[in-house]
Image (cartoon, grey):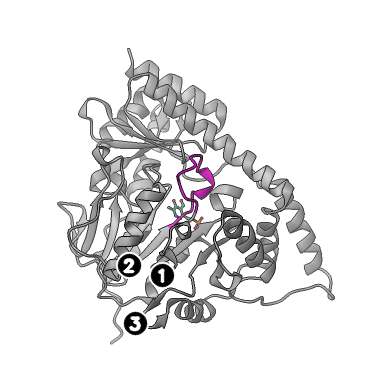
Amino acid sequence: MVKINENYLKLPGSYLFSTIARKVKEYKEANPAANVISLGIGDVTLPLPAAVISAMHRAVDEMADKSTFRGYGPEQGYDFLRNAIAENDYKARGVDISPDEIFISDGAKSDSGNIGDIFSADNVVAVCDPVYPVYVDTNAMAGRAGDYDEKTGMWTNIVYMPCLEENGFLPQLPERRPDIIYLCFPNNPSGAAATKAELKKWVDYALENGSVIFFDAAYEAYITEDDVPHSIFEIDGAKRCAIEFRSFSKNAGFTGTRCAFTVIPDELKIGGVSVKSLWNRRHTTKFNGVPYIVQRGAEAVYTPEGREQTRALVAYYQSNARLIKSELAAAGFSVSGGVNSPYVWLKTPDGMTSWEFFDELLEKANVVGTPGSGFGPSGEGYFRLTGFGSAENTREAIERIKAVFCK
Ligand code: PLP
């Protein structure tokens, strides 16, 4: 008889955002007059840059004409986009990445989830705690995580690296040696960023131990500080031990349009096998490419107008995040993140749990955020607020939080 992949049965329900939605719905039903503001959004809210829209309109017209119509494109992405990325995201920062080391895809979520396909199921995986849940769940699906322990909220075979206040919310080198290390900087959910020196420590560790780093740089555009690298490949030796995931979602508003890319350098070899060639095999077998129209839109991000418009989008969210951080810090809250990130990580006051604070914030301030415990055990006692809302709502939400909690 056919058998299912039983690893899926081990997955706990994904309750975080559904529980938030249910609680908000119930509250609104009981209090129809309440004007509830969400600072919990992890999605962008402003429209695509005008340069992207024009480029996509032009591409749509090309698709309407027999002489310029395109069918299947190269699975790895069109050269025009791979070249633009190599030139602008890497060469301009002094990093030599060739276009054929870049794989265009429909998302950093899919890529960071799918990359495990080309690695053995008996590798030991390390993640930061709190963590973007995709890394953990996709390893659980692949049978790499062991069993889920309800009591601890952890998988038995995953190495959790607690990111705590005393370490600036950065992971420390783990006691148990992992084969695969997921790093996400600037971090979701904590907003913490890793300096060059910090990333060098991880690259050296991976090279020494024969590990590979999966580096998620989905929030790279939010970096404001000079000593924070935009790419792990700015670190010497990283090309021999790292894979990088990037996305157009949070810089250019592509969350609903879908375009991202993964970089696997030629130098990354495991037991003499090129990881790039394995990924190329997987990608070309299971994926038929991002739509031409969307890739033309992504290419426009690198034009002078596209850059300026993209910068303005990011600046808008950054300014919301900065305001949340500075106002709440001035009001006596313990807050971090928000400097190189759209995310602000708030320590819940008076020892409240993340969910107790959620309820109190919803009921007394009519403001919604995301409980830190939803991202892993070390997120307990923390709360994620985001800069992705409107500037007006952000200001109003901050005033309400201050009114309730800072008497
Ligand atoms: N990586 C991280 C850390 C994220 O927070 C997100 C989205 O929230 C993604 C990846 C998803 O990116 P994409 O929209 O390209 O799939």
Specify the quadrant of the image occupied by residue 345: top left
Q: Which of 41 and 279 is in front in this view?
A: 279
Taking 319 as reference, is 374 above or below it? below
Q: Which of marks 2 and 3 is nearer the N terminus?
A: 2
Image quarter hosting the N terminus: bottom left
Q: Which of marks 1 and 3 is nearer the N terminus?
A: 1
Distance from the alpha carbon under mark 1 to that under mark 3 = 12 Å
Taking 345 as reference, is 213 above or below it? below
Q: Name the residue under label 2.
A: 207
Q: What residue type is labelled 1?
A: Arg
> Where in the figure is residue 77, as x and y percent of width and height?
62, 71
Q: Which of 180 and 65 is in front in this view?
A: 180
Q: Mark 1 points at which residue?
A: 240
Relative to 249, 357 lies left or right: left
Q: Name the residue under label 3.
A: 271
Taking 361 as reference, is 253 above or below it? below
> Where in the figure is residue 253, as x and y percent of width and height?
59, 48
Q: Which amino acid does label 2 sit on?
A: Leu
- The segment highlighted magenta reads 216-230
Q: Nearer the viewer, residue 93 or 35?
A: 93
| Callout 2–callout 1 Cβ contact below 8 Å | yes
Q: What element carries label 3?
A: loop
Mark 3 crowdedness (10 Å alpha carbons): few <14, some 14-19, many ≥20 = few
Distance from the alpha carbon under mark 2 to that under mark 3 = 13 Å
